[in-house]
Image: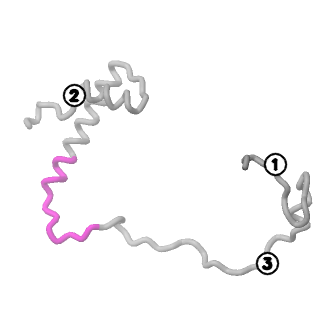
Amino acid sequence: MSPEEPRITREEVEHVARLARLELSPAEKERMRIQLDGILGYIEKLREVDVTGVEPTTHVIPLVNVMREDEVRPSYPVDAMLANAPEPEGDCFRVPKILEE
């Protein structure tokens, strides 16, 4: 494919826009065609890169879990939790039935 030949046509942009339920003006369609063409050109360049011996990764830097450890702690007092409940039932919240059996 020559550099001047577009990788994506206006009709393909219109088809994708229709699938995505987007209404684009003629100027937006042309801008989108140019942008998508650039993205496809970049993908072609990436395909030329020799990745022999490169291990696949999900992240470029190692991730560390930033969550705290799970610890057993006393829970919030039941009386305080139910204090503003409109219709508590025992130690539970009473909610309207939403599913039929």
Q: Residue furthest top?
A: 26
Q: Is residue 53 magenta?
A: yes
Residue 51, above or below 22: below
Q: Position of residue 93 (x, y in %)?
A: 84, 58
Q: Amino acid at mark 2?
A: Thr
Quarter assignment of residue 78: bottom right
Q: Position of residue 79 (x, y in %)?
A: 91, 67
Q: Amino acid at mark 3?
A: Pro
How far, Cα to Cα, is label 1 from label 2?
54 Å
Taking the spot 36% from the left edge, 29% from the top edge, the residue there is: 17
Q: Which residue is mark 1?
A: 96
Q: Position of residue 59 (x, y in %)?
A: 36, 65
Q: Earlier in the sequence, mark 2 or mark 3?
A: 2
How far, Cα to Cα, is label 3 from label 1?
29 Å
Q: Which residues are magenta?
A: 43-56
- Element at label 2: loop
Which quadrant is home to the N terminus?
A: top left
Total of numbered circles in the picture?
3
Taking the spot 15% from the left edge, 58% from the top edge, the residue there is: 49
Q: Residues within 10 Å of mark 2 (few under 14, many from 20)?
A: some
Q: Which residue is mark 2?
A: 9
Q: Nearer the viewer, residue 26 or 91?
A: 91
Q: Position of residue 13 (x, y in %)?
A: 29, 29
State whether the magenta stretch is mostly helix, strand or loop.
loop
- Element at label 1: loop
Q: Which mark is residue 74?
A: 3
Residue 30, above or below 94: above
Residue 38, above or below 90: above
Residue 62, above or below 10: below
Are the two marked residues, 3 and 1, in contact with CB atoms closer than 8 angstroms? no
Taking the spot 21% from the left edge, 46% from the top edge, the residue there is: 42
